[in-house]
Amino acid sequence: MKEVIFLGSGPSTGIPVVGCSCKVCLSPSVYNKRLRPSILIKLANKNILVDVGPDIRHQSLKYGINKIDYLIITHAHYDHIGGIDDMRIFNRIQKKSIKTFLSLSSYEEIKRRYDYIFQPNKKGHSQSASFNFKILKDDVGEFKVSNERIKYFSYFQVLKSVIGIRLKKFAYVTDIKKYDKSIFKFLKNLDVLVISCLRIQKSAVHLNVDQAIEFAKKVNAKKTYFTHMGHEISHAYLENNLPQNMFPAYDGLVINLENL
């Protein structure tokens, strides 16, 4: 079985947003309940987690995740790394460190924020989460997980370097704002593109819906799914106003990778 599960399709605040009484936050629709952004790639008996946000405990319980074989960190913003400490339980279950792929800049930021996980665990003290960090030093390249090769490429969320990934004909591109046109050569001949879009209006740090649609049209994947959507976006509204073969993602959405 090869598939992608959307563990979260929301923004850094999650949805509902605390204290907000807008129509989306008060909506009874399950499609408007969005946890912080993350996906799980399942390859045979291996689980690859892409980003470990602060909702990872809830996501793991909700979707029955009982092991993490690999972790990919796209960048070191809180909504993508805030669940690092919750990886301890997987260390205990698996009795080993989690192999983790990330850029040098993300590694350095995690080292500053979570300095204690880089210290030796002491007997009689709380045990920190344990990772086997694999630093991706180049802007583009590939690495191997299980028996599959994952390609990666870099772009920016304003000043923050972010990596996108491609597995065969599936690509995941989150928190993108600034990019070189050469990015499109990495996204040729896709069956499925996942791209982030924060809201309808323009944003200083994310693509909005129109910009994400424009990006998706250049990629021309067979299907495009939008993620990292804020509470300005109603699932039903977006679903009814996107071009053909473009869709809003939602928490729990499963994409089959068997034939990609």
Image (cartoon, rainbow, N blue to C red):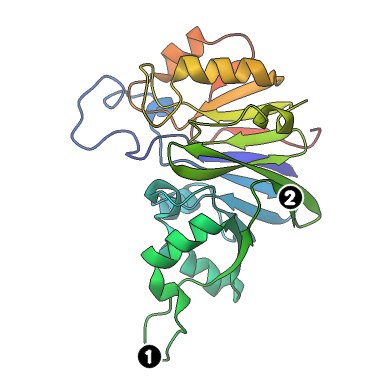
Disc 1 residue type?
Gly
- Mark linked to residue 251: none
Depth check, front residue: 15 or 227: 227
Q: Quadrant of the N terminus?
A: top right
Q: Are marks 1 and 2 in contact (CB under 8 Å)?
A: no
Q: Position of residue 200 (x, y in %)?
A: 38, 16
Q: Position of residue 58 (x, y in %)?
A: 41, 51
Q: Would residue 22 appear left or right of 72 to someone viewing this image?
A: left
Q: Would residue 164 appear left or right of 12 to someone viewing this image?
A: right
Q: Secondary structure at mark 2?
A: strand
Q: Residue at x 66, y 31 (%)?
A: 183
Q: Position of residue 120 (x, y in %)?
A: 47, 84
Q: Position of residue 84 (x, y in %)?
A: 44, 61
Camera-nearest label, 1 or 2: 2
Q: Quadrant of the C terminus?
A: top right
Q: Residue at x 61, y 75 (%)?
A: 96
The quadrant in which residue 31 appears is top left
Task: Give the spatial CA distance, label 1 vs label 2.
Answer: 40 Å
Task: Establish if 123 lies above or below 155.
Answer: below
The quadrant in which residue 198 appears is top left
Task: Establish if 96 lies above or below 210.
Answer: below
Depth check, front residue: 140 or 165: 140
Task: Establish if 212 lies above or below 82.
Answer: above
Q: Mark 2: few, some, or many residues within 10 Å (few <14, many ≥20)? A: some
Disc 2 residue type?
Glu
Q: Residue at x 43, y 50 (%)?
A: 53
Q: Which residue is mark 1?
A: 124
- Mark linked to residue 142: 2
